[in-house]
Amino acid sequence: MFNIILFGPPGSGKGTQSEKLISKFGLKHLSTGDLLRTEIAAQTPLGLEAKSFMDKGQLVPDEVVIGMISSALDANPHVGGFLFDGFPRTENQSIALDKLLNLKQTEIGVVLALSVSEEELVNRLLNRGLTSGRTDDNNEEVIRARIAEYHRKTSAVADYYTRFNKVVTIPGEGTVDEIFESLSAEIDRRSVAA
Ligand code: AP5
Ligand code: MG
């Protein structure tokens, strides 16, 4: 199994690149943002709780997303590896993920961190907000709150995995295909070595 965290701030291209990477490398895509939006659409109690945080650009509590990921890991026992997108987002979530993977006798192979300037992030998300229907995309204040939350709580995830020498930073500006090539080359290098 080769498991990857695709890491980066809101709008850095995690979802876009995940779609391409899972088909090339045969991975199971686990996006906590997508899982939460599915819960919201189904109007479950979990979804209703999560929505109150997401609409303000704040992180959903750790125990909610860790529970979701734990269930998703159990529901997919026979995959070649997982691609985590938007998870983990706090140091606590990172520690919990390592424990869950350890129980399955596997681990994170690499953390690929997309680097994009703040102004580019805001432009991309405002632009997507014109059509996405995502309530956290159509207001610049909420977009800036998401980015602030990233700096406050999520950048610690990169610090955590840097301690284990697992983080590779990839420029996240350029064409989608150029960035995909850089990510793929890094996965090839790391998964052969693993
Ligand atoms: P989530 O759904 O994870 O959203 P996000 O991290 O804020 O990021 P996005 O999905 O908006 O961006 P992305 O990096 O996937 O970029 P994309 O490819 O879409 O989380 C939403 C919320 O859920 C959080 O705020 C939080 O409340 C909650 N949540 C989720 N996970 C959680 C967790 N683990 N813990 C606690 N709370 C959690 O691209 C963005 C746009 O840019 C698109 O329009 C795309 O077409 C465009 N684009 C992509 N690549 C390029 C490029 N190279 N050049 C130009 N444009 C590009
Ligand atoms: Mg996304």
Image: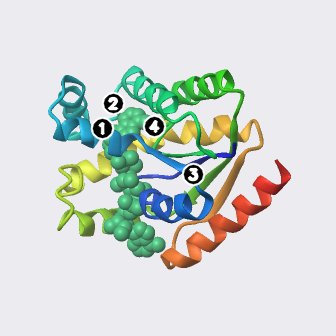
Ligand 1 location (quadrant)? bottom left
Q: Amino acid at mark 3?
A: Leu
**Residue 47, horizontal then vertical, whole percent:** 22, 31
Whether residue 57 is visible here, answered yes or no, is: no
Q: Are marks 1 and 4 in contact (CB under 8 Å)?
A: no
| Residue tagged 3 | 27
Answer with mark 1 or mark 4, whichever residue precedes in sequence. 1
Residue that protrudes farthest toward the right in the picture? 193
| Residue tagged 2 | 60
Label 1 lies in ligand 1 vicinity (Cβ under 8 Å): yes
Numbered mark located on residue 36 in the image = 1
Q: Amino acid at mark 2?
A: Val
The residue located at (24%, 35%) in the rendering is 39
| Residue tagged 4 | 152
Answer with mark 4 or mark 2, whichever residue precedes in sequence. 2
The residue located at (30%, 38%) in the rendering is 36
